[in-house]
Amino acid sequence: MNLFSPAGSASPANDAAAPRQLAVYATYLALHRIATELASSHTPGSAPLALACGMDSAGAEAAIASKLAGASFLGIDASLSLQKAAQRSRACDFLVNSTSEALRMLKLALRKSQPIAVGLLADPAASLMQLCERGVQPQFLFTPASSALSTEIQSALTLLMQRGAHSLRVSNSPALPDTESLVRWTAATPGDLRPLDTLMLAHLSAEETPRRHWLQHSPSYFLRPSPPERIGSLTTEEMSSLQAALLAPTPFLLTLRATLHGPAELAWTYANTQTHTLRITP
């Protein structure tokens, strides 16, 4: 019998840490870069598939990053508690215990052009072998340390990489160009982040897509961070423009301060690792 349940029906137990926003952002950017390079070789109408062995916090982070980057995701793990934890964090949309059911759902999502994340509750070695035998080929492959993998799993992953899968690791360090800074903004409440999100979007280059998409869609995966925070990145010019807007006594800034429930802070780090902060008080 297939186990099939929508996200949100998990039990209260939690054996995995919550997905880290910075790790998801770093992985999202890496996926987007590779997907852009592969775009010319993709079949029109196709969508990339990401696969992970293990649904601990790193697997959940890979799942969120994959969906945000436009790829469907399959996470294989025999641990029910880890799979359920991934559901609670909205990293996984559905949980099944059959490879056939997982593939059926992924194919349905492909027809709808709507990336989803499916958790496969099964033995990774056996499941990977089935996927290889069926000719399923992920474009992205997330793997734990090789020392933690059995010989069977390593053999299957090696075969998938030989067929063209790109091996990735979840990282805490976004690979940014020298002209771009990592930005983190915090606020007293999640609601206080919304006007800051709007302000950040307003200062992104009009033609910018990946970072704009991130700011528009990632908040739904991080509804209750503690403290309330947002991660992103801005170019030197965008950062200068944003600073000027926050320091000038404009109607927007006066309104922003009047609606804040507590202090908000903007912190950014340049390529030379020097960190700067700007505090906004009610």
Image: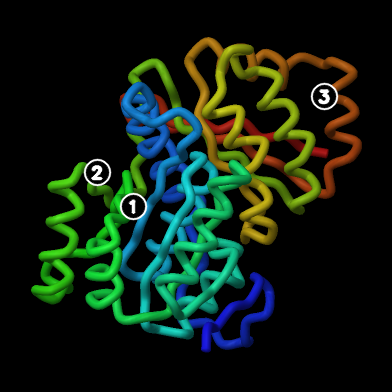
Answer few, some or many: residues within 10 Å of disc 2's Cα (few below 14, many 20 plus, some between 14 and 19): some
Q: Quadrant of residue 8?
A: bottom right
Q: How many marks?
A: 3
Farthest residue, direction front: 134
- Which of discs 3 and 2 lies nearer the camera? The answer is 2
Q: Which residue is mark 1?
A: 170
What number is the disc on residue 166?
2
User: Which numbered disc, 3 or 1, marks the residue that appears first in the sequence?
Assistant: 1
Q: Is residue 65 visible?
A: no
Display coloring = rainbow
Residue type for callout 2 = His
x, y percent for residue 130: 28, 70
CA–CA distance between discs 1 and 2? 13 Å
x, y percent for residue 42: 37, 30
CA–CA distance between discs 3 and 1? 37 Å
x, y percent for residue 157: 18, 60
- Is the Cβ of the residue at disc 1 closer than 8 Å to that at disc 2? no
